[in-house]
Image (cartoon, helix red, strand yellow):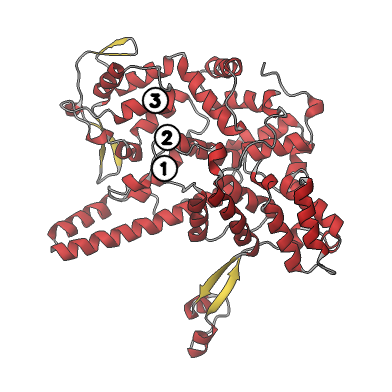
Amino acid sequence: MLNPLPSDRWNYETATHLLNRAGFGGPPDAIQKLTDMGHEQALSSLLDYENIPGVLPDPVWAHPDPEGVEALRDAVKNASPPEAQKLRQQENRLQAARMLELRGWWLDRMAYGPRPFQEKMVLFWHGHFATSIQKVQSVPNSSYLMWRQNELFRRLANANWLRLLIEAGRDPAMLVWLDQWQSRKQHPNENFARESMELFALGEGHYTEKDVTEAARALTGWSYIPAEQTFVYRPAYHDDGIKTILGLTGNLNGEDFLAQVARQPQAPRFITAKIWNFFTGQMPSPELNQALADVLTTNGNFFKPFLSVMFRSEEFYDDSIIRNEVKSPVQWLVGSVRMLQCQLPPPLISTAILRGLGQDLFAPPNVKGWDGGLSWITTNTLLDRYNDAATVVQGTMQQLSAQDFAQRPNGQGGERLKKLAERIRVGGVDITKILTPEERADKESLVSALEHRLLQSTLSDDQEKGLRDFLDTKTVLSDGDVLTAVRLVMSTPEYQVT
């Protein structure tokens, strides 16, 4: 079990599968490049991202702002009630604008950044340690806290399991999300203690209610300084009595608790099963799950060597897995942009698309995160995917003002510019970039080229007939006809899986 994929099975299909699952897919030339590399080098090009420079810069506001937080607090404190309300509303609008920018920033990293596998792991950990801005926004500078957690997942994407558990637990956004920062020895809060065992590391049935209450006691003292937006350990809040958690007895603290969780035989089985499911679209058999867990523990609970074995294994490239996972909304949007080599819609539009499809970044639906799989597809979201395909392919309409024109090269001022303000189309697919003149002119060549680029497979007979029926109504294919053909392929059941 978990034997390496035979070299004769490394081909365009398996390279496509690796790029789709360990990244967000790509155009044919990117897939062919991986194919030509061979399996080992292709894996290294994705997994060894530490050697790849050129990451996108951070948002300019992505830093603690103790002076700003204190100034706002003092201003609100000294203001009249109406003025204080106005100040809070201004701050809420600022944080909302930054969260919109943050969503766009992360999508840019996924769509255009040189480290797609790293971003795929960040997406996994975001869904695993599901933390929502809906609650974190109750504290100052909440957008920074969400960025900071996102960067934590990026920094430790392939690190040690226990280290990630501890640092995620001490993360300010998590401390607020699960109320750990308000836990006191007199009234221990059980949220993080419970979710650490139930959702993060063990699963239901592998701990007792007594373990939860004792773990909550151990975690007291883990807190947060709102003004400085940082973790702090407060000894005065900590219960230093004797506790017993999962069979371990002593004056245990938060690190002791998480270390004991990570030592449980169930811990590697739980996390490897969840990772396997994320990357393959199905839960592993008990035998495969144990083999995966053994690889993780043999490698000191470090994820990178585990993932290296997983992506090399024959099981990962099984016929039952290839092209058999429903694309998440993020995979659908980012993958579409990468395959079509076009721009992401503006952050406001991209956010609306993902929210409508059921995956609002930085706002998972609950502490369990997104269910994924077939839950992504409903009658409404499937129709939305078809409609959103038009937005990606054709671009979005943006209102340009006179000021926008003036800021452009060779812009001119004056009254004339006010008349120039108009709605123009932004983004969309440049078909000359993805299709040759011959492919755009010949219907047979067009169908084949679109299947190769968008599906890396073929359409079903019914879907192909529908596409050909449309093309047959055209004597000569215009650019608009070709764009419609792209959108029609994106509106097929085959396009919804990867």
Element type where label 1 sits in the image: loop
Residue at the image position 49 percent from the left and 81 percent from the top: 402
Which residue position is annotated with label 2? 368
Q: Residue 226 in the image: x percent, y percent?
A: 25, 44
Name the amino acid type tagged 3: Glu
Which residue position is annotated with label 1? 365
Residue at the image position 35 percent from the left and 56 percent from the top: 95
Marks 1 and 2, how far apart at CA: 8 Å
Marks 2 and 3, how far apart at CA: 10 Å
Return the residue nearer the eye: 118 or 57: 118
Q: Earlier in the sequence, mark 2 or mark 3?
A: 3
Crowding near the residue tagged with mark 3, few <14, some 14–19, many ≥20 C-alpha atoms within 10 Å? some
Vertical arrangement, residue 73 with respect to residue 284, above or below:
below
Would residue 24 be found to the left or right of residue 369 on screen?
Answer: right
Vertical arrangement, residue 25 with respect to residue 430, above or below:
above
Would residue 341 be found to the left or right of residue 97 on screen?
Answer: right
Q: Earlier in the sequence, mark 3 or mark 1?
A: 3
Return the residue nearer the eye: 367 or 137: 367
